Image: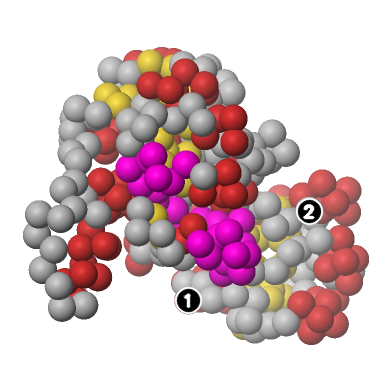
Amino acid sequence: MSTLIIDNVDPLIKERLEQVGIKVDLRPGIPREELIKIIKDYSVLIFRGRLKIDREVMDAGINLKILARYGVGLDNVDVDYAIKRGIAVVSAPHAPTQSVAELTLCLMLAVARRIPLLDAKVKGGEWPKGRYVGVELGGKTLGVVGFGRIGRAVAHIARGIGMKILAADVIDVSMEVEKLGGRQVPLEHLLRESDVVTIHVALTPETYKLLNAERLALLRDNAILINTSRGEVIDHEALLQHLDRLWGVGLDVLPEEPPKSPHLKKLITHEKVVVTPHVGSETREAMRRLAEELVSNIEEVISRIKL
């Protein structure tokens, strides 16, 4: 049995798979057209979010048994078609929780205190002391949209610096929120009552542009909006219309990565917007946990289907 790795991943994955007798080929950055030509020779495909793993790829992979996403989200995989084809799909949903949660807090603090703007001014030869007064997060209300693993980790850290917690979710998470002294409320209530809103939802048809023009209009003046989930959950053209009244926005994800649309370029160059290039899980610790969790999940599938 053989495995093809088409993106940069922790070397531990190759080491661990080879230890159990699995041949591993590394082709990071391989173009889609070339992948389709050679995928027939592999039983396992390990990838990140660069390429769409759709039915064309799977149909070419006549021997594919496992699709392994080095990460959390599966929005670049046609999971329904994989199931139809009898191909197992695995990822590593637990590994990046702490890293994404910490980046979320970093973005909150960076927006609240205008850190990137001040840094750029000083490096450019200015000394803007007194021109950009920040705000504190302690005592403010944090609205967490999506109270899963990452949302809960963010709330836990935020509670430690004195923030009050509201949460919105499609399932009942009231007990988990109450453990942090917070409340579960409807999404519209959360948007109206929060000083900071942070989004932690998967991309689904229901969450696509979850924060549309109508919901963005509910945000308080001088609110902070953070998104480290998926770019498509916000209507960014509508968000542009609210920047002047918001305190600021922190984004680790965009609907185009890298951004090409004029409205996205206008958004990310605004002085109230702090942007990072989808690096929520990119810490040494998370990369190693991703590798360990993914290999364990691959090995479990192999043992179950006796490849």
Q: Quadrant of the N terminus?
A: bottom right
Looking at the rendered structure, the secondary structure element under dot 2 is loop
Looking at the rendered structure, the secondary structure element under dot 1 is helix
Is residue 128 at all visible to an observer of this figure? yes
Foreground label between 2 and 1: 2
Please give the name of the residue rendered at 36% of the width and 47% of the height, measured from the top-left corner.
Answer: 248
Assess whether mark 1 and mark 2 are in contact (beta carbons under 8 angstroms).
no
Judging depth in this view, the residue of 96 and 184 nearest the camera is: 184
Q: Is residue 134 left or right of residue 14?
A: left
Judging depth in this view, the residue of 58 and 250 nearest the camera is: 250
Q: Which residue position is annotated with label 1?
A: 11
Q: Residues within 10 Å of mark 1 (few under 14, many from 20)?
A: few
- Give the dominant element type of the magenta stretch: helix, strand or loop: loop
Please give the name of the residue rendered at 43% of the width and 64% of the height, measured from the top-left corner.
Answer: 269
Q: Which mark is residue 58?
A: none
The spot of residue 18 in percent (x, y) is 58, 76
Please give the name of the residue rendered at 40% of the width and 45% of the height, measured from the top-left corner.
Answer: 244
Q: Which residue position is annotated with label 2?
A: 78
The spot of residue 178 in percent (x, y) is 34, 16
- Is residue 88 within the magenta segment? no
Judging depth in this view, the residue of 104 and 178 nearest the camera is: 104
The spot of residue 250 in percent (x, y) is 39, 51
Q: Going from the N terminus, do you reach mark 2 or mark 1 first?
A: 1
Q: CA distance from mark 2 to mark 1?
A: 27 Å
Is residue 99 at all visible to an observer of this figure? no
Q: What segment is highlighted magenta in the picture?
A: 242-266
Q: Amino acid at mark 1?
A: Pro
Q: Is residue 125 left or right of residue 270?
A: left
